[in-house]
């Protein structure tokens, strides 16, 4: 037997079937990062949805109150500039107030400036609606 002869099977290739532990760990890490990103997206989506709901409610309240003010007589006490500003009146979590300016923009007209204010995730928000009554 020659001295430099290789032992049998010393350099046989291993079978490459299956996954190594490193490959599985890398795949799990990528999957975990993806799941966390989706969770953050859901949280942000819920916050924006909540803000949109509050804005819709504020818009409904502003529309209701403005229609109520527009339906009263021109000389009604609720549209008296001397008593302005009115409110805040609380409707649920919303504060409604309005001011009246007489003879603006022209004589025999009243400008009504209505504001609905609320708290959204610790930040004060408001919606302002203007109307002119003859």
Image (cartoon, helix red, strand yellow):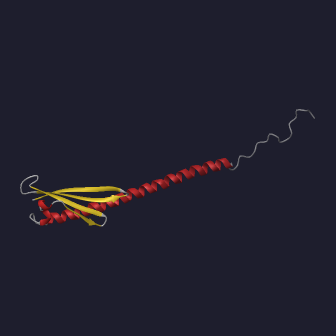
Vertical placement of residue 94 versus 2, above or below: below
Nearest the eye: 84 or 75: 84
| Spot occupied by residue 16 in the image (x, y as percentages of width and height) | 71, 46
Q: Which residue ends up furthest to the left in the rendered image?
A: 107
Residue 79 position within the rendered picture, expressed as x and y whole percent measured from the top left: 13, 62
Q: Nearer the viewer, residue 11 or 62?
A: 62
Q: Quadrant of the N terminus?
A: top right
Query: What residue is drawn where x is 32% and y is 56%?
Result: 124
Q: Is residue 34 left or right of residue 22?
A: left
* x and y, in percent, of residue 129 in the image: 21, 56
Residue at image coords 70%, 49% = 17
> Which quarter of the figure has residue 132?
bottom left
User: In the figure, is residue 67 to the left or right of 39?
Assistant: left
Give the quadrant of residue 85.
Answer: bottom left
- How many marks do you count on the picture? 0
Q: Residue furthest front?
A: 82
Quarter of the picture holding the C terminus = bottom left
């Amino acid at each position: 037997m020659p001295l430099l002869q290789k032992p049998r099977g010393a350099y046989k290739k291993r079978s490459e079937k299956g996954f190594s532990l490193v490959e599985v760990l890398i795949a799990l890490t990528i999957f975990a990062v993806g799941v966390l990103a989706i969770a953050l997206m859901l949280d942000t989506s819920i916050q924006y949805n909540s803000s949109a709901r509050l804005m819709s409610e504020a818009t409904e309240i502003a529309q209701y109150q403005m229609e109520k003010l527009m339906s009263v007589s021109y000389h009604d006490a609720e549209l008296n500039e001397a008593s302005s500003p009115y409110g805040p009146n609380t409707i649920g979590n919303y504060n409604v107030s309005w001011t009246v300016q007489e003879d603006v923009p022209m004589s025999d007209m009243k400008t009504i400036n209505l504001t609905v204010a609320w708290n959204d995730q610790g930040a004060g928000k408001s919606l302002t609606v203007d109307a002119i009554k003859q």
